[in-house]
Image (tube, helix red, strand yellow):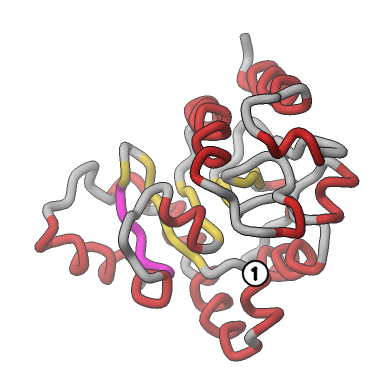
């Protein structure tokens, strides 16, 4: 089975999933979208109103801002894979609950295994917490680290800048690092000891 076929199979499973209570209010599942050879995967938190209607991730205001940010580094939406930690909309856009995150974990794990991207960008604290526990995004945003073989870079969620315009420049600076991270992804070690982690992250953040 090709990567494209595997991703389509996962998407089909998501559309009929009943593993958690989110399926009761689902109009359309939102498995994610993008090319099977994407070098970057963006992982958000969960679908919103428009995503639930269209079955596509990041199609609202935050998605428009994400596309603008990609343009600043010479990329388009079609160049990257975009998904979320939960594939169905939490009612009222509330935070996803632990059992909902657990129910979707297997889908995201399989997507990442299939895509094998050079860089994984987490958007927001729930996405970040999947890889980096007990951390504050304000302290570690834009700093890459290798987690379970993946080069993970936490970013603020684009929606954060829509509510707090002061964050816009921080998000733009983080996005500016992505081309260098893609180019130098292989240089980041698979294992970094705790006392070296901050130093290594600072070094890569300069690319």
Identify the element where label 1 is drawn: helix
Residue 1 location (% of width, % of height): 62, 9
- Which residue sits furthest top? 1
Q: Residue at x 54, y 63 (%)?
A: 124
Q: Is residue 116 left or right of residue 201?
A: right
Q: Classify residue 139 by image quadrant.
A: bottom left
Chain part drawn in magenta: 141-146
Q: Is residue 185 left or right of residue 55?
A: left
Q: Residue at x 32, y 45 (%)?
A: 147
Can you see residue 97?
yes
Residue 5 location (% of width, % of height): 69, 16
Q: Residue at x 81, y 41 (%)?
A: 25
* Residue 159 lies in the magenta stretch: no
Can you see residue 207?
no
Front residue of 27 and 169: 27
Prevailing secondary structure class for the magenta stretch in the rendered image? loop
* Residue 142 lies in the magenta stretch: yes
For label 1, the residue is: 158
């Amino acid at each position: 089975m090709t990567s494209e076929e595997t991703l389509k199979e996962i998407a089909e499973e998501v559309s009929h999933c009943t593993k958690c209570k989110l399926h009761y209010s689902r109009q359309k599942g939102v498995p994610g979208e993008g090319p099977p050879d994407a070098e970057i995967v963006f992982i958000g938190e969960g679908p919103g109103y428009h995503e639930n209607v269209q079955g596509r991730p990041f199609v609202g205001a935050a998605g428009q801002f994400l596309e603008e940010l990609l343009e600043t580094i010479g990329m388009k939406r079609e160049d990257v894979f975009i998904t979320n930690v939960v594939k169905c909309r939490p009612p009222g856009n509330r935070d996803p609950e632990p059992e909902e995150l657990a129910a979707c974990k297997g889908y995201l794990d399989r997507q990442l295994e299939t895509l094998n991207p050079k860089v994984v960008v987490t958007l927001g604290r729930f996405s970040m917490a999947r890889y980096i526990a007990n951390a504050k995004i304000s302290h570690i945003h834009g700093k890459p680290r290798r987690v379970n073989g993946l080069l993970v870079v936490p970013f603020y969620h684009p929606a954060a800048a829509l509510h707090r315009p002061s964050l816009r420049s921080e998000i733009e600076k983080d996005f500016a690092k992505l081309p260098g991270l893609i180019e130098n992804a292989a240089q980041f070690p698979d294992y970094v000891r705790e006392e070296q982690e901050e130093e290594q992250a600072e070094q890569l953040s300069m690319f």
